[in-house]
Amino acid sequence: QVQLAESGGAQVQAGESLRLSCTASGRAVSTYAVGWFRQAPGKEREFVGQVNWSGDRTVYSDSVKGRFTISRDKVKNTVFLQMDNLRPEDTAVYYCAARRGVEFDSWGQGTQVTVSS
């Protein structure tokens, strides 16, 4: 497993941008795929997107496609979630997670994103 730490959460206005960071540490961290998830109050955790271990393939949920971008800096062992044109419905705690197999089995502690209308 790897250790993950998110940062960058904040309160912003609708239409603004925010970039979250997920810094990883541990053995062979560069071989893990990394995903972003979010959980709003009273709702189940939702998949946002993911990037593969090499950083050249990304997948996004329909709710964020075209607004959010995931990128990976393998030198710094950091994965970024660039969020543009934020909406109030994007308000949630955002988590990053890592996997080598099918399931994400390492999770960060989360960072709060609040979007005001």
Image: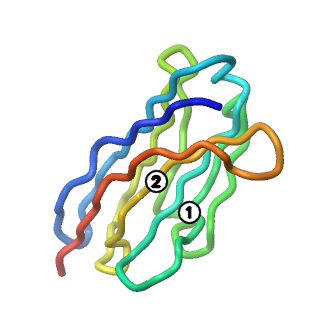
Residue at the spot 50% in from the left edge and 28% down from the top edge: 24
Where is residue 86 drawn, in percent x and y?
33, 68
Horizontal side of 76 relative to 27 (left or right) equals left
Secondary structure beneath label 1:
strand
The residue pinned by badge 1 equals 48
The residue pinned by badge 2 equals 95
Where is residue 85 drawn, in percent x and y?
34, 66
Vertical order, 26 against 49 (above or below)? above
Where is residue 31 drawn, in percent x and y?
73, 25
Badge 2 amino acid: Tyr
The nearer-to-camera label among 1 and 2 is 2
**Considering the image in quadrants, where does the N terminus appear?**
top right
Residue at the spot 69% in from the left edge and 18% down from the top edge: 28
Sequence-first disc among 1 and 2: 1
Secondary structure beneath label 2:
strand
Vertical order, 77 against 20 (above or below)? above
